[in-house]
Image (spheres, rainbow, N blue to C red):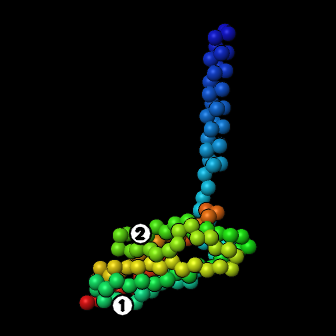
Amino acid sequence: IVWKYKKLNMKLITLLSFLLFCVFSLNAQTTPATDNDIAKFLKFTNDNYDMGKIPNGKPVEYNVDVQNISNSNITLDNVIVGCGCTTPKYTKNIVLTPGAHTIITLGFNGAAIGPFSKSATLFFSGNLVKPVSFRGEGVQ
């Protein structure tokens, strides 16, 4: 009978340990802020840009303006593009003080005939993540 209780106690301890591990693991994960949350901190210009018609093979660029509209400093951590045909130019780890702007230049190599749509993701401190996109049409 003593053996049965020890076995039961070990199962309970194992189960409780597993549950605690799960709770702490889930608590440690954070989710990116939504566009509504980001709008409380940052203002974007040209975050969904139409390049119009561009000549095939002619590289083009456009600027995304980002302004800090919060009362706290926000850092631009990284910019990740959706494909190798898109190149970002930006100052990594730039700190945007309240009211400050930064420019992120997104380039496209122009290697498309017909409609195209490309994207990039901007990562900021405070788990703020903003997808941006541009589109156009490559013509001969």
Q: CA distance from mark 2 to mark 1?
A: 21 Å
The amino acid on which the numbered mark 2 sits, given as a three-letter code, is Gly
Comparing 92 with 4, the one in front is: 92
Image-based side of 70 in relation to 15, left or right:
right
> How far across and how far down the image is residue 23, in percent?
65, 43
- Is residue 112 visible to the viewer in this orientation of the structure? no
Pointer 2 with pointer 1, Cβ within 8 A: no
Residue 53 tag number: 1
What residue is drawn where x is 49% and y is 83%?
Answer: 63
Whole-percent x, y for residue 94 in the image: 58, 70
Q: Quadrant of the N terminus?
A: top right
Q: Amino acid at mark 1?
A: Lys
Q: In terms of image quadrants, where is residue 40? A: bottom right
The mark nearer the N terminus, 2 or 1, is 1
Question: Where does label 2 land, which residue?
Answer: 82
Looking at the image, residue 67 lies above or below residue 32: below
Residue 106 visible in this rendered orientation of the protein: yes
Disc 2 element: loop
